[in-house]
Image: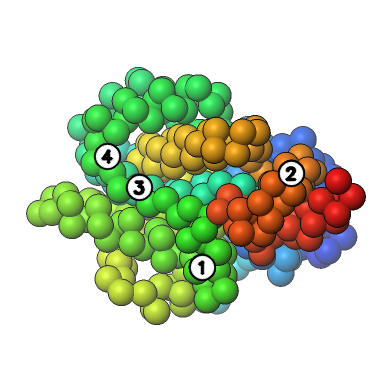
Amino acid sequence: MAQIQVIKVSKETIKKMQTFYEKNRLNKAVPYTEFVAKTGNTTITAYTSGKVVFQGPDAERVAAKWGKPIQKKGSSTSSKKIIDPLPANFSQLSVLGSDEVGNGSYFGPVTVCAAYVDKTMVTKLKALGVKDSKELTDPQIVQLSAVIKELIPYKLLIVEPEKYNQIQPKYNAVHMKVALHNQAIHLLLKEIAPTKPEAILIDQFTPEANYKKYVHSEQNQVSEKLYFITKGEQYHVAVAAASIISRAAFLEELDKESKELGMKVPSGAGTTSDKIAAKVLVKGGMELLGKYVKLHFANTDKAKKIAAKI
């Protein structure tokens, strides 16, 4: 059974862990974290507070290298394991999972997908190769997404950059994702009614308390049978399916942007993004750039400096 182990360490130990797991780090932005890594079948999330969460069947063994588990008040000191909060046999239940893509990319939209996988479909989806989208090539993702969408109910939300820039001053990145996940889940629950999932699993991008704080300001709040865990695709194929559909939609939107602009639009937020954005600025100014990028990123100022020299 998968476990969760939590330890508290010093800043010095966090730095040592960062170095130790450098090759295992995941390219996933989780607020209030120093890093997220995966070693073997264990995911490690190190928070700026000094808490480090280990998730997976070997969580206890991996965590033991770095410190002792935090004891909850009133718990026995002889109790070593912090048991996975997910229901027993979770991977075989009928689950609605959600995931998002694009939040950390300067170009392109934010895509959020909620997908419902009935227990009778779990084995079939796994046999098709539905798994963590990071383990698949882009062509595989686009191909698999088309197949998945024919097999299971899903709800996909796409926030284009122009719309994102209108919302962003009011909603920070985390609040926006909370709103999108909640809305996608709500719409899918309406669509599959009267069927009800045995659980709803959100691929965790912010602490649960933070999610609940932001969702209070949203209409149609979904709160029943809700679970949060990082690397959710490890725990149920529904999250993997949602991740693949979201990623495919993101890639398709980037391809559309590339065709419209007449230049290859990159994902991510590196120096290539700065250079392409500078070309867009020269071509059509801020008005044009705002249709293709998330303007509040630091890349915008870098692009302006490059454009000034062209």
Q: What is the C-alpha distance between the residues marked 3 and 1?
A: 20 Å
User: Which mark, residue 279?
Assistant: 2
Q: What is the C-alpha distance between the residues marked 1 and 2?
A: 23 Å
What residue would you read off at disc 3?
156
In the rendered structure, which amino acid carries the disc numbered 3? Leu
What residue would you read off at disc 4?
117
- Tell me whether circle 4 and circle 1 mark residues in contact (CB < 8 Å): no
Frontmost of labels 4 and 3 is: 3
Determine the residue positioned at 52% across, 72% down. Answer: 171
| First along the sequence among labels 2 and 3 | 3
- Tell me whether circle 2 and circle 3 mark residues in contact (CB < 8 Å): no
Q: Nearer the viewer, residue 180 or 51?
A: 180
Within 10 Å of disc 1 (Cα), the crowding (few <14, some 14-19, many 20+) is few
| First along the sequence among labels 3 and 1 | 3
How is this picture coloured? rainbow
Q: Secondary structure at mark 4?
A: strand
